[in-house]
Amino acid sequence: MNATPRYEKLGLFYLGRELPIGGEPSNPLPLLYNSKHLTTHGVIIGMTGSGKTGMGINLIEEAIMDDVPAIIIDPKGDMANLMLTFPDLRPADFQPWIDSSEASRKKRSVEQLAEETARTWKNGLSLWGQGKERIRTLVEKADLTVYTPGNYSGVRISIVSRFAAPTDEIVNDPDSLNALVSSTCNSLLSLVNIEGDPLVSREHVLVSSLLLHFWRNKEDLTIESLIGAIVTPPFEKVGVFGLADYFPQSARMKLAMLLNNVVANPSFSAWLEGDPLDIQHILYGEKGTPRTAIFSIAHLSDKERMFFVTLLLNALISWMRRQEGTSSLRALLYMDEIFGYFPPTGNPPSKKPMLLLLKQARAFGVGVVLATQNPVDLDYKGLSNIGTWFVGRLQTPQDQQRVLDGIVGSRDGHLDRTRVRQLLSTMKGRQFLLASAHLEAPLLFETRWAMSYLKGPISLQDISKLMRNRRKEEEKAEPEANVLPARAGDVQHQPPIVHESIVQRYFLPPVYTDEIIFEPWLAASASVRFYNAKRNIDQIKSCKIRCYLDDFYTEPRWSESEAFDIDLDACRDRPPKASLFLSLPSNVSALKSFKRYEKEFSDYLYHSQRLSLLRVPSLRMESKPGEGKDAFMVRVSGRLREEKEAAIEKRLRKFQARRDRIEAKLQRAYAKLEKEKHDVFQKKTDTLVSFGTAILGAVLGRKAVSSTTLSRTAGGIKKAGRISKEKEDVRVAEQTAAQLEQERTALLVEQNDAIEALIDTYDFSKITTESFSIKPRRSDIFDVQVCLLWEMVPPQL
């Protein structure tokens, strides 16, 4: 039987150890904080030297241990310390990260300082009950990536797709759409130092109108296409004024040139290469495995930071709105220094999306945790949406007052302002006051020792070293250019003659060439409907394939044909003058129609097309049309987390009555004993009681279990030997108390074993998926069309 439950699997974050407040007796309970409480968001506040960065590192470490993906915005360069985890704790592991100048100041060699650092970390972890195995588990679970926007040191990130049309949920919500348009417009214009009033600035109005126009029509935009739309907008009026009067062509060209200068700058190319800014891919890997992404932006200018942070927040909102609602913590957004991005006055581009996240993210299981040195730098409306406060040492009365207003003011007068102020003024480094909407009263705690080596700010050179292997993997994974073989056949100055009933289409890609040569393809398109009323599925898929008509063509082999994405209806029905044509196979020229091909193509689709889906029978879950396996497994993981949390709480409550009875008996037994008694139980019993009590309090809440009572009963037995043995009543009371202590310990062990067994039933690695498919009916294949497609041969470079 396990004495200490695996709290990582209970959705509990091990953040530190509770400390006594004022004159209260010492309480050795570890601080285990329920992860789902962070769906109401959190803030970490503390001056330099308070341990704020270590607190944030601990929080992310616990998220990794609990399989919660995270996005970290790192304006200072501290959070990449999460990469420095060394399970073996060898001096050689620390040595590459030791600062030689620091070693000189301490009159040590780098090797000596590395040895001292390794010893310090090993001892520190040991004092907090963390061994090499826990670090090794962290390393095994962590899928960490350091992105460096606009720079090649870390993993590259591309912003090209970030003007993609938002989801229907956002488009149909005027407040969300307006906030997205406004923040995107502001961040884009900030690159060219345009920060005018959105209600007055012509630039703001024009760019906002363009974004609204294209997004409402579900059309994506790149920076290049947006610049083109500024020069030639797709509308004639802005409001009631004609475009030429409101914003003349020459002025629009000036704005377009400013944006073009930014894009044309060679340094901007780093913004356009690398991984797409796809939140699903950033948060989850293959099979739905969680990832932790660190966006290091310390190297960027202020306007570039604002630009990127705003794009990232908007991308997160768009992803979030596509998720199902949940009460569990699905993902975490952590920003290490919020100064300037969410101020109480002013409206930088990042403010609206951040406020929107704080207001709406809870419903989708997305927790936001912000860190700052000065609480006065945070918007007060935003603070009112934050349910968890980690407050470290504060320097000024103004900062203390803002915290008091936030913590005490949100409790409707149920907290003592004087008591909270006293706590804020007496805290030491690594000590934090935890005030939460989920706790009856604030508590004081000391943060545990970080498993990651806290080196200090991580430079771009350090990041390059850390991400070297990841960049090599990406380079290997990049597909080689698809070089098409030379087209064979005789070139003709006139199109080959075919029967008039055969439909012909002519496709010219948007490239310049002195000579247009067309090559022939047999193109087929159709719509396939997948319908299943029981599953509420009504999906229409467009199928388009083609085969090349060379000299070896005999009959279409649809199963060997290639897919294409050309819009046949948008193609020309006549070729440009002076075009050249490759020859057609004679058996195609002799055909009078493609009716037989259409029938064969329809039969091929009926037998080959399937809507492939996945299901998890044990959870009665099925994937949705268009949902990939990775996305489905993310949903499965979220459902497992929800059901596990509910099952654990239900199981613990079943033990509640038995615990209450034993506690009541213990209180009566100890009432008969005198104050001075010595310890008759072994230390592991106290440890078991301590962790067991912390777990109960974290899962069920402090009202459900009295930590004070359990602490007193655990400590009271320590004093059982100073009473004279002649007193029979004391001896009996001691025996009774000892027996009850044993009963309680046995109950905790039984409870922990029951939880362990329960956890195993919700193990994500044991989930079994099945594949199934939905086939179309004959009548569900329609709009079948086979035509002769003439595609222009790409010019040789």
Image: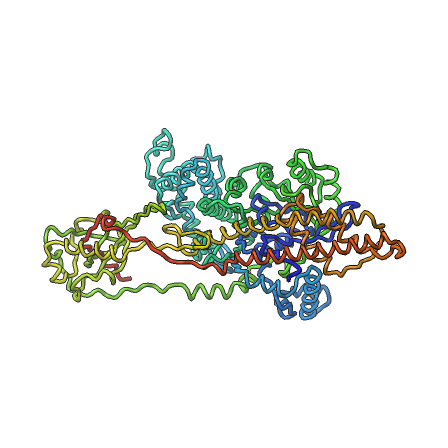
Q: In this rendering, would 381 be left or right of 473? A: right
Q: Residue 738 location in percent, x, y?
A: 77, 56
Please name the colour scheme applied to the rendered image.
Answer: rainbow
Q: Is residue 584 above or below residue 639?
A: below
Q: In this rendering, would 676 be left or right of 179? A: right
Q: Is residue 252 above or below residue 610?
A: above
Q: In this rendering, would 484 be left or right of 640? A: left
Q: Residue 96 location in percent, x, y?
A: 61, 67
Residue 295 visible, this angle: no
Identify the residue at horizontal 81%, vertical 47% (top origin): 671
Q: Residue 424 location in percent, x, y?
A: 72, 44
Q: Residue 415 location in percent, x, y?
A: 70, 37
User: In what quadrant of the picture does the C terminus appear?
Assistant: bottom left
- View extreme (top): residue: 240
Residue 211 visible, this angle: yes
Dividing the picture into quarters, in which one does residue 43 lie? Answer: top right
Q: In this rendering, would 19 be left or right of 40? A: right
User: In what quadrant of the picture does the N terminus appear?
Assistant: bottom right
Closer-to-camera residue (197/562): 562
Q: Is residue 479 above or below residue 420?
A: below
How many marks the image carries: the answer is 0
Closer-to-camera residue (542/699): 699
Closer-to-camera residue (274/445): 445
